[in-house]
Image (tube, rainbow, N blue to C red):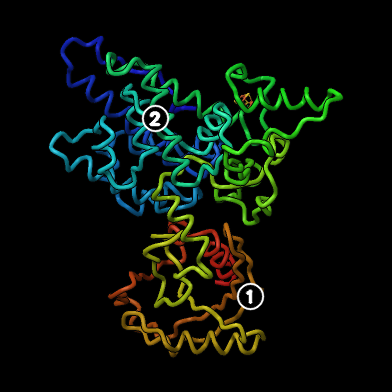
Protein backbone atom coordinates (compact mmCIF):
# COMPACT_ATOMS: atom_id res chain seq x y z
CA UNK A 1 0.00 0.00 0.00
CA UNK A 2 1.64 3.23 -1.13
CA UNK A 3 0.43 5.17 1.90
CA UNK A 4 2.20 2.82 4.33
CA UNK A 5 5.58 4.39 5.07
CA UNK A 6 8.16 4.33 7.85
CA UNK A 7 7.46 6.68 10.72
CA UNK A 8 9.47 9.92 10.64
CA UNK A 9 11.23 10.51 13.95
CA UNK A 10 11.45 14.26 14.46
CA UNK A 11 13.65 13.81 17.56
CA UNK A 12 16.55 12.80 15.29
CA UNK A 13 16.60 16.39 14.14
CA UNK A 14 17.86 18.48 17.05
CA UNK A 15 16.62 21.73 15.51
CA UNK A 16 13.28 21.09 13.80
CA UNK A 17 14.17 22.37 10.36
CA UNK A 18 11.93 23.60 7.57
CA UNK A 19 12.62 20.33 5.75
CA UNK A 20 11.46 18.03 8.51
CA UNK A 21 8.33 20.12 9.01
CA UNK A 22 7.61 19.88 5.29
CA UNK A 23 8.18 16.11 5.32
CA UNK A 24 5.83 15.60 8.27
CA UNK A 25 3.25 17.86 6.69
CA UNK A 26 3.34 15.87 3.50
CA UNK A 27 3.16 12.57 5.36
CA UNK A 28 0.11 13.73 7.34
CA UNK A 29 -1.55 14.82 4.10
CA UNK A 30 -0.92 11.39 2.53
CA UNK A 31 -2.42 9.60 5.53
CA UNK A 32 -5.43 11.91 5.37
CA UNK A 33 -6.03 11.29 1.67
CA UNK A 34 -5.66 7.52 2.05
CA UNK A 35 -7.99 7.31 5.05
CA UNK A 36 -10.69 9.34 3.29
CA UNK A 37 -10.39 7.26 0.12
CA UNK A 38 -10.55 4.01 2.10
CA UNK A 39 -13.91 4.90 3.63
CA UNK A 40 -16.39 2.44 2.12
CA UNK A 41 -13.88 1.44 -0.55
CA UNK A 42 -11.60 -1.56 -0.84
CA UNK A 43 -7.84 -1.24 -0.76
CA UNK A 44 -7.22 -2.57 -4.26
CA UNK A 45 -9.58 0.03 -5.72
CA UNK A 46 -8.00 2.87 -3.78
CA UNK A 47 -4.34 2.24 -4.73
CA UNK A 48 -4.42 3.66 -8.30
CA UNK A 49 -6.62 6.57 -7.20
CA UNK A 50 -4.23 7.39 -4.37
CA UNK A 51 -1.18 7.25 -6.65
CA UNK A 52 -2.84 9.44 -9.25
CA UNK A 53 -4.02 11.93 -6.61
CA UNK A 54 -0.61 12.28 -4.98
CA UNK A 55 1.15 12.67 -8.32
CA UNK A 56 -1.32 15.46 -9.25
CA UNK A 57 -1.33 17.18 -5.85
CA UNK A 58 1.70 16.05 -3.83
CA UNK A 59 1.12 18.53 -1.01
CA UNK A 60 -1.83 19.99 0.82
CA UNK A 61 -0.95 23.36 -0.73
CA UNK A 62 -1.21 21.85 -4.23
CA UNK A 63 -4.62 20.44 -3.44
CA UNK A 64 -5.83 23.71 -1.93
CA UNK A 65 -5.07 25.57 -5.15
CA UNK A 66 -6.59 22.89 -7.42
CA UNK A 67 -9.68 23.49 -9.53
CA UNK A 68 -12.69 21.81 -7.91
CA UNK A 69 -13.89 20.21 -11.13
CA UNK A 70 -10.47 18.63 -11.53
CA UNK A 71 -10.66 17.32 -7.96
CA UNK A 72 -14.03 15.73 -8.68
CA UNK A 73 -12.73 14.30 -11.94
CA UNK A 74 -9.82 12.63 -10.08
CA UNK A 75 -12.39 11.07 -7.71
CA UNK A 76 -14.54 9.75 -10.55
CA UNK A 77 -15.43 6.10 -9.83
CA UNK A 78 -14.70 6.14 -6.09
CA UNK A 79 -18.26 7.09 -5.09
CA UNK A 80 -19.47 9.44 -2.34
CA UNK A 81 -18.10 12.51 -4.08
CA UNK A 82 -18.74 14.65 -1.02
CA UNK A 83 -15.57 13.08 0.40
CA UNK A 84 -13.54 14.73 -2.38
CA UNK A 85 -15.25 18.05 -1.78
CA UNK A 86 -14.53 17.90 1.94
CA UNK A 87 -10.90 16.95 1.33
CA UNK A 88 -10.58 19.93 -0.95
CA UNK A 89 -12.23 22.24 1.58
CA UNK A 90 -10.04 20.80 4.32
CA UNK A 91 -6.90 21.52 2.31
CA UNK A 92 -8.02 25.11 1.80
CA UNK A 93 -8.64 25.41 5.56
CA UNK A 94 -5.11 24.14 6.28
CA UNK A 95 -3.42 26.66 4.00
CA UNK A 96 -5.58 29.44 5.46
CA UNK A 97 -3.99 28.80 8.87
CA UNK A 98 -1.04 31.02 9.85
CA UNK A 99 1.27 27.94 9.98
CA UNK A 100 -0.09 26.64 6.63
CA UNK A 101 0.63 23.14 7.88
CA UNK A 102 -1.27 20.07 9.06
CA UNK A 103 -1.94 20.13 12.82
CA UNK A 104 -0.84 17.11 14.85
CA UNK A 105 -3.23 17.49 17.78
CA UNK A 106 -6.67 15.88 17.70
CA UNK A 107 -8.50 19.02 18.81
CA UNK A 108 -7.04 21.05 15.92
CA UNK A 109 -7.51 18.29 13.36
CA UNK A 110 -11.18 18.08 14.32
CA UNK A 111 -11.60 21.72 13.33
CA UNK A 112 -10.89 20.88 9.68
CA UNK A 113 -13.80 20.13 7.31
CA UNK A 114 -14.34 16.41 6.80
CA UNK A 115 -12.09 15.24 9.62
CA UNK A 116 -13.85 13.24 12.31
CA UNK A 117 -12.57 11.35 15.33
CA UNK A 118 -11.37 8.37 13.32
CA UNK A 119 -9.43 10.32 10.68
CA UNK A 120 -7.99 12.66 13.31
CA UNK A 121 -6.75 9.64 15.30
CA UNK A 122 -5.24 8.06 12.20
CA UNK A 123 -3.37 11.23 11.15
CA UNK A 124 -2.17 12.05 14.66
CA UNK A 125 -0.93 8.52 15.41
CA UNK A 126 0.33 7.30 12.04
CA UNK A 127 1.94 10.49 10.74
CA UNK A 128 2.92 12.25 13.94
CA UNK A 129 3.35 9.34 16.36
CA UNK A 130 0.98 10.63 19.02
CA UNK A 131 -0.77 8.12 21.31
CA UNK A 132 -4.26 8.66 19.90
CA UNK A 133 -6.77 5.85 19.26
CA UNK A 134 -8.78 4.92 16.18
CA UNK A 135 -12.02 2.95 16.20
CA UNK A 136 -13.63 1.70 13.02
CA UNK A 137 -15.78 -1.39 12.49
CA UNK A 138 -12.73 -3.64 12.24
CA UNK A 139 -11.08 -2.34 15.40
CA UNK A 140 -14.40 -2.44 17.29
CA UNK A 141 -14.83 -6.09 16.33
CA UNK A 142 -11.34 -7.06 17.52
CA UNK A 143 -11.67 -5.18 20.81
CA UNK A 144 -15.15 -6.41 21.63
CA UNK A 145 -14.09 -10.01 20.97
CA UNK A 146 -10.89 -9.65 22.93
CA UNK A 147 -12.90 -8.36 25.88
CA UNK A 148 -15.79 -10.78 25.35
CA UNK A 149 -18.31 -7.95 25.11
CA UNK A 150 -21.53 -9.00 23.41
CA UNK A 151 -22.67 -5.51 22.62
CA UNK A 152 -24.14 -3.47 19.81
CA UNK A 153 -21.10 -1.46 18.71
CA UNK A 154 -23.33 1.08 16.99
CA UNK A 155 -24.99 1.90 20.26
CA UNK A 156 -23.61 5.23 21.51
CA UNK A 157 -22.79 3.91 24.97
CA UNK A 158 -21.00 0.89 23.53
CA UNK A 159 -18.94 2.92 21.08
CA UNK A 160 -18.06 5.48 23.77
CA UNK A 161 -16.86 2.62 25.92
CA UNK A 162 -14.80 1.09 23.08
CA UNK A 163 -13.23 4.50 22.31
CA UNK A 164 -12.17 4.67 25.97
CA UNK A 165 -10.75 1.16 25.84
CA UNK A 166 -8.86 1.94 22.61
CA UNK A 167 -7.52 5.12 24.20
CA UNK A 168 -6.33 3.35 27.35
CA UNK A 169 -4.66 0.61 25.34
CA UNK A 170 -2.75 2.91 23.01
CA UNK A 171 -1.60 5.13 25.85
CA UNK A 172 -0.40 2.09 27.75
CA UNK A 173 1.57 0.55 24.88
CA UNK A 174 3.02 3.92 23.86
CA UNK A 175 4.14 4.74 27.42
CA UNK A 176 2.14 7.90 27.33
CA UNK A 177 2.64 10.55 28.75
CA UNK A 178 6.34 9.88 29.36
CA UNK A 179 6.85 9.35 25.62
CA UNK A 180 5.21 12.06 23.55
CA UNK A 181 5.93 10.77 20.02
CA UNK A 182 7.01 7.34 18.76
CA UNK A 183 6.44 4.82 15.97
CA UNK A 184 4.30 2.66 18.27
CA UNK A 185 0.91 4.47 18.08
CA UNK A 186 0.80 4.27 14.29
CA UNK A 187 1.96 0.67 14.25
CA UNK A 188 -0.53 -0.30 16.95
CA UNK A 189 -3.51 1.29 15.23
CA UNK A 190 -2.61 -0.11 11.83
CA UNK A 191 -2.07 -3.57 13.34
CA UNK A 192 -5.56 -3.54 14.90
CA UNK A 193 -7.15 -2.35 11.65
CA UNK A 194 -5.27 -4.99 9.69
CA UNK A 195 -6.11 -7.78 12.12
CA UNK A 196 -9.80 -6.86 11.93
CA UNK A 197 -9.81 -6.77 8.14
CA UNK A 198 -7.79 -9.93 7.51
CA UNK A 199 -8.07 -12.37 10.46
CA UNK A 200 -10.64 -11.23 12.99
CA UNK A 201 -13.23 -10.93 10.24
CA UNK A 202 -16.94 -11.68 10.77
CA UNK A 203 -15.93 -15.32 10.25
CA UNK A 204 -12.68 -15.15 12.17
CA UNK A 205 -9.62 -17.25 11.45
CA UNK A 206 -8.80 -17.75 15.12
CA UNK A 207 -6.27 -20.48 14.41
CA UNK A 208 -4.07 -17.86 12.66
CA UNK A 209 -4.64 -15.12 15.21
CA UNK A 210 -1.56 -13.77 16.98
CA UNK A 211 -3.59 -12.57 19.96
CA UNK A 212 -5.68 -15.69 20.42
CA UNK A 213 -4.27 -16.26 23.94
CA UNK A 214 -5.81 -13.07 25.31
CA UNK A 215 -9.11 -13.37 23.46
CA UNK A 216 -12.06 -13.76 25.79
CA UNK A 217 -14.53 -14.70 23.05
CA UNK A 218 -12.20 -17.35 21.65
CA UNK A 219 -11.50 -18.88 25.04
CA UNK A 220 -15.16 -18.91 26.01
CA UNK A 221 -15.93 -20.55 22.69
CA UNK A 222 -13.26 -23.14 23.32
CA UNK A 223 -14.60 -23.87 26.78
CA UNK A 224 -18.12 -24.14 25.41
CA UNK A 225 -17.05 -26.51 22.69
CA UNK A 226 -15.23 -28.74 25.15
CA UNK A 227 -18.22 -28.73 27.42
CA UNK A 228 -20.52 -29.73 24.56
CA UNK A 229 -18.24 -32.63 23.76
CA UNK A 230 -18.41 -33.92 27.32
CA UNK A 231 -21.38 -35.95 28.48
CA UNK A 232 -22.35 -33.45 31.14
CA UNK A 233 -25.09 -31.08 30.06
CA UNK A 234 -24.40 -27.52 31.14
CA UNK A 235 -26.41 -24.41 30.28
CA UNK A 236 -25.18 -22.11 27.49
CA UNK A 237 -23.00 -19.48 29.16
CA UNK A 238 -24.89 -16.70 27.40
CA UNK A 239 -28.26 -18.03 28.49
CA UNK A 240 -26.96 -18.23 32.02
CA UNK A 241 -25.22 -14.85 32.04
CA UNK A 242 -27.29 -11.98 33.37
CA UNK A 243 -24.61 -9.31 33.00
CA UNK A 244 -23.92 -8.88 29.26
CA UNK A 245 -26.21 -7.45 26.59
CA UNK A 246 -27.03 -9.71 23.69
CA UNK A 247 -24.74 -9.39 20.72
CA UNK A 248 -26.14 -8.16 17.42
CA UNK A 249 -23.88 -9.79 14.88
CA UNK A 250 -25.22 -7.49 12.15
CA UNK A 251 -23.38 -4.57 13.62
CA UNK A 252 -20.04 -6.27 13.89
CA UNK A 253 -19.78 -7.49 10.32
CA UNK A 254 -17.84 -5.98 7.47
CA UNK A 255 -18.76 -5.89 3.82
CA UNK A 256 -17.16 -8.75 1.94
CA UNK A 257 -15.15 -7.27 -0.94
CA UNK A 258 -17.09 -9.17 -3.56
CA UNK A 259 -20.31 -7.54 -2.39
CA UNK A 260 -19.14 -4.01 -3.00
CA UNK A 261 -20.50 -2.41 -6.14
CA UNK A 262 -18.15 -1.03 -8.75
CA UNK A 263 -18.86 2.47 -7.41
CA UNK A 264 -17.12 1.36 -4.25
CA UNK A 265 -20.44 1.67 -2.45
CA UNK A 266 -22.09 -0.78 -0.16
CA UNK A 267 -24.25 -3.56 -1.59
CA UNK A 268 -27.78 -2.83 -2.66
CA UNK A 269 -29.19 -5.78 -0.76
CA UNK A 270 -28.60 -6.19 2.90
CA UNK A 271 -29.09 -9.65 4.27
CA UNK A 272 -31.84 -9.89 6.79
CA UNK A 273 -30.70 -9.68 10.37
CA UNK A 274 -31.61 -12.48 12.69
CA UNK A 275 -31.13 -10.11 15.57
CA UNK A 276 -34.11 -11.11 17.59
CA UNK A 277 -32.72 -14.55 18.22
CA UNK A 278 -30.48 -15.11 21.19
CA UNK A 279 -26.87 -14.51 20.20
CA UNK A 280 -24.72 -17.36 21.29
CA UNK A 281 -21.05 -17.87 20.70
CA UNK A 282 -21.79 -20.31 17.92
CA UNK A 283 -23.94 -17.76 16.14
CA UNK A 284 -21.34 -15.10 16.77
CA UNK A 285 -18.77 -17.03 14.81
CA UNK A 286 -21.03 -18.44 12.12
CA UNK A 287 -22.82 -15.43 10.72
CA UNK A 288 -21.27 -12.93 8.36
CA UNK A 289 -23.75 -10.21 7.65
CA UNK A 290 -22.91 -7.12 5.65
CA UNK A 291 -23.09 -3.83 7.47
CA UNK A 292 -21.41 -0.46 7.67
CA UNK A 293 -18.24 -1.06 9.56
CA UNK A 294 -15.60 0.47 7.38
CA UNK A 295 -13.57 3.32 8.69
CA UNK A 296 -16.32 5.88 8.41
CA UNK A 297 -16.21 9.12 10.29
CA UNK A 298 -19.40 10.34 11.87
CA UNK A 299 -19.95 12.79 9.02
CA UNK A 300 -20.11 9.91 6.52
CA UNK A 301 -22.18 7.77 8.82
CA UNK A 302 -24.74 10.55 8.84
CA UNK A 303 -24.64 10.73 5.07
CA UNK A 304 -25.14 6.98 4.78
CA UNK A 305 -27.96 7.01 7.32
CA UNK A 306 -29.61 9.90 5.56
CA UNK A 307 -29.31 8.21 2.20
CA UNK A 308 -30.88 5.05 3.58
CA UNK A 309 -33.98 6.99 4.63
CA UNK A 310 -34.30 8.71 1.28
CA UNK A 311 -37.07 7.32 -0.90
CA UNK A 312 -35.77 9.00 -4.04
CA UNK A 313 -32.73 11.23 -4.23
CA UNK A 314 -33.61 14.89 -4.01
CA UNK A 315 -31.81 15.67 -7.22
CA UNK A 316 -34.34 13.71 -9.25
CA UNK A 317 -37.16 15.98 -8.21
CA UNK A 318 -36.52 18.98 -10.50
CA UNK A 319 -33.80 20.45 -12.60
CA UNK A 320 -33.53 23.20 -15.15
CA UNK A 321 -30.83 22.18 -17.51
CA UNK A 322 -27.54 20.33 -17.31
CA UNK A 323 -26.96 21.12 -13.66
CA UNK A 324 -25.31 19.91 -10.46
CA UNK A 325 -27.02 18.57 -7.35
CA UNK A 326 -25.60 20.43 -4.38
CA UNK A 327 -25.96 17.76 -1.75
CA UNK A 328 -26.49 14.04 -1.32
CA UNK A 329 -24.81 10.92 -2.57
CA UNK A 330 -23.87 12.44 -5.93
CA UNK A 331 -23.12 15.93 -4.68
CA UNK A 332 -21.38 18.22 -7.17
CA UNK A 333 -21.82 15.95 -10.18
CA UNK A 334 -23.36 17.24 -13.39
CA UNK A 335 -26.68 15.79 -14.47
CA UNK A 336 -29.08 16.16 -17.37
CA UNK A 337 -32.42 17.94 -16.84
CA UNK A 338 -34.69 15.45 -15.20
CA UNK A 339 -37.92 15.02 -13.32
CA UNK A 340 -39.57 12.23 -11.36
CA UNK A 341 -42.43 10.31 -12.92
CA UNK A 342 -45.51 9.67 -10.87
CA UNK A 343 -46.65 6.16 -10.00
CA UNK A 344 -49.43 6.41 -12.59
CA UNK A 345 -47.03 7.15 -15.49
CA UNK A 346 -46.81 3.52 -16.45
CA UNK A 347 -47.22 3.58 -20.23
CA UNK A 348 -44.73 4.79 -22.85
CA UNK A 349 -47.28 7.29 -24.20
CA UNK A 350 -47.92 8.86 -20.82
CA UNK A 351 -44.21 9.00 -20.05
CA UNK A 352 -43.44 10.66 -23.38
CA UNK A 353 -46.18 13.24 -22.78
CA UNK A 354 -44.77 13.87 -19.33
CA UNK A 355 -41.26 14.36 -20.80
CA UNK A 356 -42.64 16.80 -23.39
CA UNK A 357 -44.44 18.78 -20.69
CA UNK A 358 -41.29 18.90 -18.58
CA UNK A 359 -39.06 20.05 -21.46
CA UNK A 360 -41.59 22.73 -22.36
CA UNK A 361 -41.39 24.06 -18.83
CA UNK A 362 -37.65 24.61 -19.11
CA UNK A 363 -35.78 27.71 -20.13
CA UNK A 364 -32.04 27.81 -20.48
CA UNK A 365 -30.31 31.05 -21.20
CA UNK A 366 -31.68 32.57 -24.35
CA UNK A 367 -33.16 29.35 -25.58
CA UNK A 368 -36.88 28.69 -25.32
CA UNK A 369 -36.92 24.95 -24.78
CA UNK A 370 -40.63 24.69 -25.45
CA UNK A 371 -39.60 24.68 -29.11
CA UNK A 372 -37.23 21.75 -28.58
CA UNK A 373 -37.91 18.98 -31.07
CA UNK A 374 -38.44 15.41 -29.91
CA UNK A 375 -35.92 13.10 -31.60
CA UNK A 376 -36.28 9.73 -29.93
CA UNK A 377 -36.62 7.80 -26.71
CA UNK A 378 -34.56 4.88 -25.46
CA UNK A 379 -35.02 1.58 -23.70
CA UNK A 380 -35.37 2.11 -19.93
CA UNK A 381 -32.07 2.16 -18.06
CA UNK A 382 -31.86 0.57 -14.63
CA UNK A 383 -29.22 1.80 -12.23
CA UNK A 384 -28.75 0.22 -8.81
CA UNK A 385 -27.65 2.48 -5.99
CA UNK A 386 -26.71 1.35 -2.53
CA UNK A 387 -30.25 1.17 -1.34
CA UNK A 388 -32.54 1.79 -4.28
CA UNK A 389 -33.16 0.74 -7.82
CA UNK A 390 -33.64 3.60 -10.23
CA UNK A 391 -35.32 3.19 -13.61
CA UNK A 392 -34.49 6.03 -16.02
CA UNK A 393 -36.44 6.80 -19.20
CA UNK A 394 -34.19 8.92 -21.39
CA UNK A 395 -35.46 11.15 -24.19
CA UNK A 396 -33.48 12.94 -26.84
CA UNK A 397 -34.61 16.46 -27.78
CA UNK A 398 -32.96 18.81 -30.23
CA UNK A 399 -32.94 22.57 -29.74
CA UNK A 400 -33.85 24.14 -33.05
CA UNK A 401 -33.18 27.77 -32.29
CA UNK A 402 -29.55 27.79 -33.39
CA UNK A 403 -29.56 31.49 -34.23
CA UNK A 404 -28.64 32.26 -30.66
CA UNK A 405 -26.20 29.42 -30.20
CA UNK A 406 -23.28 31.78 -29.77
CA UNK A 407 -24.84 33.55 -26.86
CA UNK A 408 -26.09 30.68 -24.79
CA UNK A 409 -25.87 31.65 -21.18
CA UNK A 410 -27.20 29.53 -18.37
CA UNK A 411 -27.55 31.70 -15.32
CA UNK A 412 -29.23 31.41 -11.95
CA UNK A 413 -29.66 28.43 -9.66
CA UNK A 414 -29.16 25.57 -10.06
CA UNK A 415 -25.75 25.86 -11.74
CA UNK A 416 -26.19 25.03 -15.43
CA UNK A 417 -24.09 24.97 -18.53
CA UNK A 418 -24.06 23.86 -22.14
CA UNK A 419 -21.42 21.33 -23.07
CA UNK A 420 -20.00 20.45 -26.49
CA UNK A 421 -20.60 16.86 -27.53
CA UNK A 422 -16.85 16.47 -27.96
CA UNK A 423 -16.23 17.63 -24.37
CA UNK A 424 -18.70 15.33 -22.65
CA UNK A 425 -16.01 12.79 -21.76
CA UNK A 426 -14.34 15.39 -19.57
CA UNK A 427 -17.46 16.14 -17.55
CA UNK A 428 -17.95 14.64 -14.10
CA UNK A 429 -21.17 12.63 -14.32
CA UNK A 430 -22.55 9.87 -12.12
CA UNK A 431 -22.52 6.37 -13.58
CA UNK A 432 -26.28 6.60 -14.26
CA UNK A 433 -25.96 9.92 -16.12
CA UNK A 434 -22.98 8.56 -18.04
CA UNK A 435 -25.13 5.61 -19.20
CA UNK A 436 -27.81 8.07 -20.38
CA UNK A 437 -25.23 10.06 -22.27
CA UNK A 438 -23.88 6.92 -23.95
CA UNK A 439 -27.36 6.23 -25.28
CA UNK A 440 -27.73 9.74 -26.64
CA UNK A 441 -24.16 9.87 -27.96
CA UNK A 442 -24.85 6.98 -30.29
CA UNK A 443 -27.56 9.09 -31.81
CA UNK A 444 -25.79 12.41 -32.36
S1 LIG B 1 -8.85 -15.18 18.60
FE1 LIG B 1 -10.37 -15.08 17.00
S2 LIG B 1 -12.02 -13.80 17.83
FE2 LIG B 1 -10.21 -13.49 19.11
S3 LIG B 1 -9.23 -11.69 18.26
FE3 LIG B 1 -8.29 -13.48 17.31
S4 LIG B 1 -9.43 -13.84 15.39
FE4 LIG B 1 -10.62 -12.43 16.71
Q: Give the percent coordinates (x, y) of residue 250.
A: 62, 46
Rendered image: mark on residue 378? 1
The image quadrant where one finds the C terminus is: bottom right
- Mark 2, residue position: 133
Seen in the image, is 3 located left or right of residue 344?
Answer: left
Residue at (50, 26) in percent of width and height: 192
Closer to us: 319 or 74: 319
As drawn, 331 above or below 63: below
Q: Considering the numbered disc 2 on the image, is that residue within a helix, a strand or a loop?
A: loop
Choose the circle earlier in sequence order: 2 or 1. 2
Residue lying at 52% horizontally and 88% vertically, measured from the top left: 356
> Image check: 137 left or right of 270?
left
Tell which of 233 and 67 is nearer to you: 233
In the picture provided, is 343 more to the left or to the right than 316?
A: right
Q: Where, by quadrant of the figure, is residue 11 drawn?
A: top left
Q: Which of the two discs, 2 and 1, sits closer to the camera?
A: 2
Eyeballing the image, is 311 above or below 46? below
Front-most of residues 388 and 25: 388
Quarter holding ligand 1? top right
Judge by depth and name the residue closer to the eye, 14 or 74.
14
Amino acid sequence: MPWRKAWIDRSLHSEPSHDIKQTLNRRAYEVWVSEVMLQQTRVSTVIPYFNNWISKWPTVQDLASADHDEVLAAWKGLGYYSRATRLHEGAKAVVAKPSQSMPDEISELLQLPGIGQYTAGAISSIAFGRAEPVLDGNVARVLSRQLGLYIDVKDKKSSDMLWKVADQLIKEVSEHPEVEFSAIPGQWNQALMELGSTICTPRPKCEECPIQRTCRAYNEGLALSKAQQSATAIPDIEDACTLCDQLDTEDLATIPEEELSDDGLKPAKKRKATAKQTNTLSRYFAIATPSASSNVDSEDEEAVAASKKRKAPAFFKTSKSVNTPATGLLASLWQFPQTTLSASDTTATVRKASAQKYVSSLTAGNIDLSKARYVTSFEPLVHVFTHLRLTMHAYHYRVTDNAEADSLICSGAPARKWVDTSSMDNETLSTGMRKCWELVAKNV
